[in-house]
Image: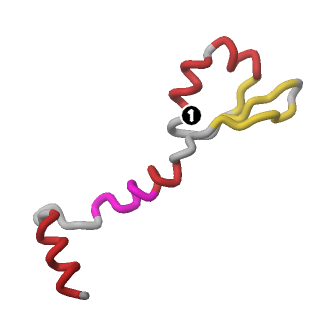
Amino acid sequence: MSITATELKMNLSKYLMLAEKEDIYITRNGKVVAKLSNPYQDRVDMAKSLFGVLPQAMTLEQANEERLGRI
């Protein structure tokens, strides 16, 4: 998403919430001058990629026992 610096000033709280989910490029006179982003986005993406790795019927304890059994 790209917004002007004026738009950012007028609606800062809105764009802070949006920055949790996507990068926001701030422009001044048509040129990108800054980027507003979530510093933890890599962690969020990694956690989302792990969602569904364990079968729903398996508990965390069972998964841990299986992992330790392979060592």
Residue drawn at the location 39% of the way across and 56% of the way down: 47
Percent x, y of residue 57 = 10, 64
The residue beneath circle 1 is 19
Q: Residue at x 23, y 66 (%)?
A: 54
Quadrant of the image occupied by residue 61: bottom left
Residue at x-position 86% and y-position 29%: 30
Q: Quadrant of the N terminus?
A: top right
Closest to the observer: 28 or 65? Answer: 65
**Residue 32 placement, left or right of 42:** right
Q: Quadrant of the C terminus?
A: bottom left
Kindly give the residue lying farthest to the bottom in the view shown.
71
Q: What amino acid does circle 1 point to?
A: Ala
Within 10 Å of disc 1 (Cα), the crowding (few <14, some 14-19, many 20+) is some
Residue 34 pos. (x, y %): 76, 35
Residue at 68% across, 20% down = 8
Q: Which residues are magenta?
A: 46-52
- Asked if residue 12 lies in the magenta stretch, the reply is no
